[in-house]
Amino acid sequence: MASPAAYEPPTVTRAWQAFLTHVPTMLLIWVATAVISGMGFGIYVVINVIAYLVAGGQAMSEMAEAVAMALGQLGQLPFSILSSLVGVLFTAVPALHYASGETIGIEAAFQALFRRPWRYLLAGLLFSLVTVIGLLLCVLPGIAVALVGPVYVNKVFNTDLPVLETLRLSFQAVYRSPRGWEFVGIELLTGLVVAVVSVVTCGLGALVAVPVSSFYIQNVAYHRGVLS
């Protein structure tokens, strides 16, 4: 059972207030994600520069260039995985907040993440795979999968159910609950608002709009009975 606040009528003001109490946590998540991603890109660049120097500063053959790019991406892979793992906290922190009713500080957020990292990596891999398959099947199934994301993250972090079962129950909660389609409509509208805010502010607005929308959507999910 989630905290009583999770079932209260969702408003942008309540989501904003929840965000304000979590600004230090959200800010560190953003910084950590950016730094890790930057380190990965740096590794990619270094490997390609080394390959260029090994070639004597001359243009590389297509084969050598392909090998250098492959090695660069391989070196970047661990950082991409870690960046994605940390980035999921943007949704997980609101989920943990409404489940417990407590403010999720920096230490609590990262403790929750690294207590079961393999579970979250497996969950992310499964969700990404299903989403990609859905996008390949005329796009719409992939969008349908993506809309399950907030509920899926909540269940992955707040339950001990097997990951595959968690995904199945998340689909069931969103698309078979009495007010599930209402929840989907609110998700789409919220995503549109976030996109507009991000575009008109040249991306800067996303730093606030994305986490605020995460708090709002989690509240909506509980209030509409998609989460309990």
Image (cartoon, grey):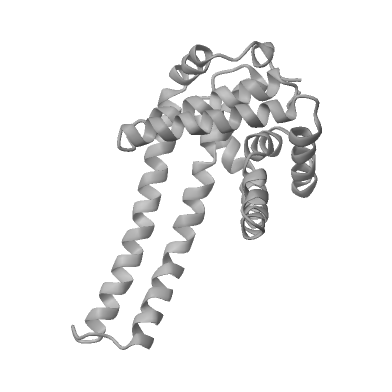
Q: Does residue 71 lie above or below 137 as drawn?
A: below
Quadrant housing residue 208:
top left
Question: Which of 173 and 72 lies nearest the eye of the viewer?
Answer: 173
Whether residue 147 is visible to the viewer of this picture, yes or no, is: yes
> Which residue occupies the extreme front position in the image?
138
Judge left or right: residue 66 versus residue 147: left
Judge left or right: residue 207 versus residue 83: left
> Which residue occupies the extreme left position in the image?
57
Whether residue 160 is visible to the viewer of this picture, yes or no, is: no
Residue 76: x and y in percent read 42, 63
Q: Does residue 42 lie above or below 174 as drawn?
A: below
> What residue do we see at 36% from left, 30% from top?
205
Quadrant housing residue 202:
top left
> What residue do we see at 43% from left, 28% from top?
209
Judge left or right: residue 6 versus residue 105: right
Q: Does residue 52 lie above or below 186 as drawn?
A: below
Residue 19: x and y in percent read 47, 21
Quadrant housing residue 187:
top right
Question: Which of 95 and 7 lies nearest the eye of the viewer?
Answer: 7
> What residue do we see at 77% from left, 33% from top?
173
> What residue do we see at 34% from left, 37% from top?
203
Residue 204: x and y in percent read 32, 34
